[in-house]
Image (tube, rainbow, N blue to C red):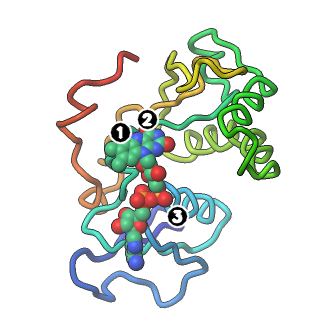
Amino acid sequence: MVDGSTQHSGSIGSVSRHGIPEEVDVVIVGSGGAGLMAALTAAKEGARVLVVESREIVGGATGISAGAAWIPNHGFSTEELKVDDDLDEARRYIYGEGRDQILDHDVIEKFLETGPHVARFIEGHTSFGWIPALWPDYRSDIDGASVGRALFPGPYSPEGLGEAARYVRPALTTGMARNPLPL
Ligand SMILES: Cc1cc2nc3c(=O)[nH]c(=O)nc-3n(C[C@H](O)[C@H](O)[C@H](O)COP(=O)(O)OP(=O)(O)OC[C@H]3O[C@@H](n4cnc5c(N)ncnc54)[C@H](O)[C@@H]3O)c2cc1C
């Protein structure tokens, strides 16, 4: 799969050079959430990006997960659910959950700072939409726990991808897809 502008081409199944450009700026190995997020970011910065995926369809474990993103202070809940969040509370919750043992403080601070921007970036540059939910944090007994920090993926249609739509996993009909969350 290739993404730089809106170009999508490639091959599935056996390895083939069909549709693969001679030269790219960034090669991403794996098309899960981490890989596609890196690909999106690089492409939006103007890089020519090649995503290499070993499976027949994209998405990896991300594509069969519930897709919930835990992002404190993302703002969608404030706008849509009228629930406020507070970064200091979120920080206390993270350190309470991690018991301050193995956490990299710089990474935690960067996560708190950039998480809301990342959520907006994804919505702003894709046809993907978040659904905020009044979902409680897993450990409501920990200081700083709150509700509304989970963002769930909204309905998505790959039609706009044209030929590349065939690389997208069909909607699941089992598990949470069958018993959706009471959002
Ligand atoms: C049922 C389920 C529910 C979950 N629910 C949630 C949730 O709600 N919230 C949450 O935060 N997490 C959840 N998780 C965990 C979460 O899905 C994973 O931690 C996350 O998706 C990992 O993303 P990733 O991009 O690192 O890896 P993946 O999404 O697994 O992507 C890796 C990709 O790399 C490809 N690949 C591997 N090796 C190569 C290679 N050599 N060459 C080319 N391609 C390669 C794989 O085929 C795959 O497509 C859930 C997981 C499962 C299974």
Which residue lies at the image location 33% right of the left edge and 89% below the top edge? 17
Q: Which residue is mark 1?
A: 156
Vertical placement of residue 114 versus 19, above or below: above
Image location (x, y in percent) of residue 24:
55, 82
Between the C-alphas of marks 3 and 2, the distance is 24 Å
Q: Report helix, strand or loop for mark 2.
A: strand
**Compared to 6, does 158 lie above or below?**
above
Relative to 139, residue 5 above or below: below
Tell me: is circle 3 under 8 Å from ligand 1.
Answer: no
The C terminus, quarter of image:
top left
Tag 3, which secondary structure? Answer: loop
Q: Is mark 1 within 8 Å of ligand 1?
A: no
Q: Is residue 18 left or right of residue 78?
A: left
Q: Which label number is shown at residue 153?
A: 2
Mark number for residue 5?
A: 3
Q: Amino acid at mark 1?
A: Tyr
The tag on residue 136 is none
In the rendered structure, the answer to whether residue 45 lies left or right of residue 172 reads right
**How far apart are labels 1 and 3 at the CA level?**
20 Å
